[in-house]
Image (cartoon, helix red, strand yellow):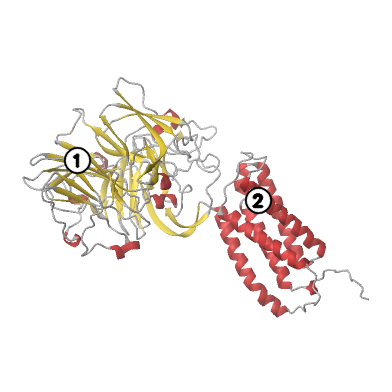
Amino acid sequence: MHTKQKWSFSPSDHSQVTINSAALLTLGAALIHFAVVPEHLQEYLLFGIFFIAVGLAQVALAFRLFTAPSRQLLVAALVSTVALVALWVLSRTTGLPIGPEPWKPEDMGVPDIICIVLEVVSILIFLVLLLPKRRPVVRRLGRMIAGTIPVVVLVGLLTSVGVESATNAMPVAFNASPPIPGQPSTSLTSLVAPPGPQPVKNFTLTAQVKQINGQQAWTYNGTVPGPELRVTQGDRVRVTLINHLPVSTTIHWHGVDVPNAEDGVAGLTQDAVAPGGTFVYDFIANDVGTYWYHSHQDTANQIPQGLFGAFIVEPPSGHVAQAHDYTVMLHLDQSGTRATVNGVTSGGDLHLDARPGETVRLRLVNAVAPGMDGGPEAPVLLGAPYQIVALDGHDLSGPQLLGPERIPLGIGQRADLVFTMPAHGAVRLIDTNLPGEASAFQSFLGVPFSTNETVTIGTGAIPTAPAPKRVPLFDETHYGTPTTDAVAAGPFGGTYPVVLDEGPGFHGGRPDLVHSINGQATPYVPPITVHLGEIVRLHIVNRTGEFHPIHIHGHIFSVLAMNGSPISGSPLHLDTVLVGPHETADVAFLANNPGIWMLHCHVLMHAAEGMSMTINYVGITTPFEMGSRSGNMPE
């Protein structure tokens, strides 16, 4: 007859490596809980207090596991950790009954996924430790240390990723220029177009989901691109945005001189328009030119899905001098892989009418969202000599006739081409691109032009595309006739460095290739503070092997020099300056439009990874905030 013995726990009964593993996993989870405390204190005070308490309890538990493990301690650890996991599952599925948004499931991020993995594995170890062992394991110090080291490395790595992700998450709330108690200030919400007698042009843009060519697209009024909006200089433009999307959105007027309250940047100049909501943009069309509009809420996702369109301001006569005036918008289809012109997908050719001897104006708009290298499009016109009469909507002085040249256009840039149709044959526009160092293997040297994106103007024989290596690149810095540029002449109120860089790190709560300005990533890049009326000079330095089209909101750059060489042709007035790999650009702008304005790389991936900052006028504040609490995510 055998007597059943009561099982009791002692350190010699089990491998100390297993005990140490449980302690390390618990300690790792505690550190991640501490890392998310600031975010949760902002979000909801009780949540912050809860995470402090949990972190302290887990540190105490880990210490006791290292020093004095017992059966009672393991049971308590098992029960409490199971309760934490269950609470996490509840918060991510049905939501909690308390908090800023009761019963709304929370999003899952890198920190909480790593934390829950550490806790689930620790639960399994607690169960193993609580099973009785009939054969005691002899403890040997060397074996224990050797067995514990891999656990230390693995748990340390996971914990560091979780902590770094938590401490570099998009903040709960970030205000780019908050009011300061006791200091006079003006809210940007008051910076609107004053009433006046201008003719009013009314438009309605309905953001909605639609199937296009078998793919789901996010559209304005059911089309991609959205409808072209044409107005006359001096018109008052009123655009009503109706949001029928499942997410919030805005409209930004790229390159258009608008008051700050109409700029359409979520979390900076307005709250994003929620599903079912509306917003009215109201501004004066001050400047003739070629512009475009697009979402500025979660831009990296919403523009590629289709939320963009052309905005054209015609001269007071109501039309340009050319017989034909066409907008050519380069973009990708909804899959992000097929080249498209005005919605005509790869393999197709957009045909535009024109007769021999007629003059044609092509307004090229680059809305192609490039890959990580940021490579610009480089369209070339074949079959007729042409002039580039405007860049980014602004006329060039004394433009000369050109033969075939590839015209580099970063995303967001525009170029107006004017030519006369030949007596015989058609004219063709063919789009190519310029890869950065990251995709230099895609170089077009010696490779025929792709015919995926083409526009044919007129009828008859189509010109043959030459090898790209024999087609020079257009150099805007030496084109046209010099003339006076008051902004470029200075004097400058200040010169500010804008250093563009990249490197591995954490941004938005996830491991990423962080793109930075002056060593910081949005929203923590220190702003450039300016005074009304001063001329501000920027020295832009690109330390990366990528292209960066740097876009300024609400102002126009006068380009001073590229790579240290001063501009020798027509003055260049751009809202987006393309800075190539390891290049520099010197630009200036007149601070004549008060507000809080974005300055950012327009490569959508780069902006989403941190390459964005603001220009803040002294005394101007914003009531809006970006971050998880507001749901405003401008990039």
Residue at label 1? 484
Q: Point out which mark residue 212 bears.
A: none
Q: Is residue 486 left or right of residue 44?
A: left
Residue closest to the far right: 1
Residue 484 location, x and y as percent?
19, 40
In the image, residue 574 sits, relative to residue 580, either above or below, namely: above
Quick check: can you spot residue 596?
no
Judged from the image, the secondary structure of the residue bearing numbered disc 1 is loop
Q: Amino acid at mark 2?
A: Trp
Q: Residues within 10 Å of mark 1 (few under 14, many from 20)?
A: few
Residue 371 location, x and y as percent?
36, 55
Residue 235 location, x and y as percent?
28, 26
Q: Residues within 10 Å of mark 2 (few under 14, many from 20)?
A: some
Give the mark nearest the N terminus, 1 or 2.
2
What residue is drawn where x is 47% and y is 37%? 272
Quick check: can you spot residue 604?
yes
Q: Amino acid at mark 1?
A: Thr
For the residues carrying marks 1 and 2, which lies nearer the camera in this image? 2
Q: Is residue 133 left or right of residue 276?
A: right
Q: Is residue 142 left or right of residue 238?
A: right
Which of the two residues, 579 or 9, is positioned nearer the viewer here?
9
Residue 46 location, x and y as percent?
68, 43
Residue closest to the far top: 197
Is the N terminus in the top left, top right, bottom left or bottom right quadrant? bottom right
Judged from the image, the secondary structure of the residue bearing numbered disc 2 is helix
Residue at label 2? 88
Marks 1 and 2, how far apart in space? 65 Å
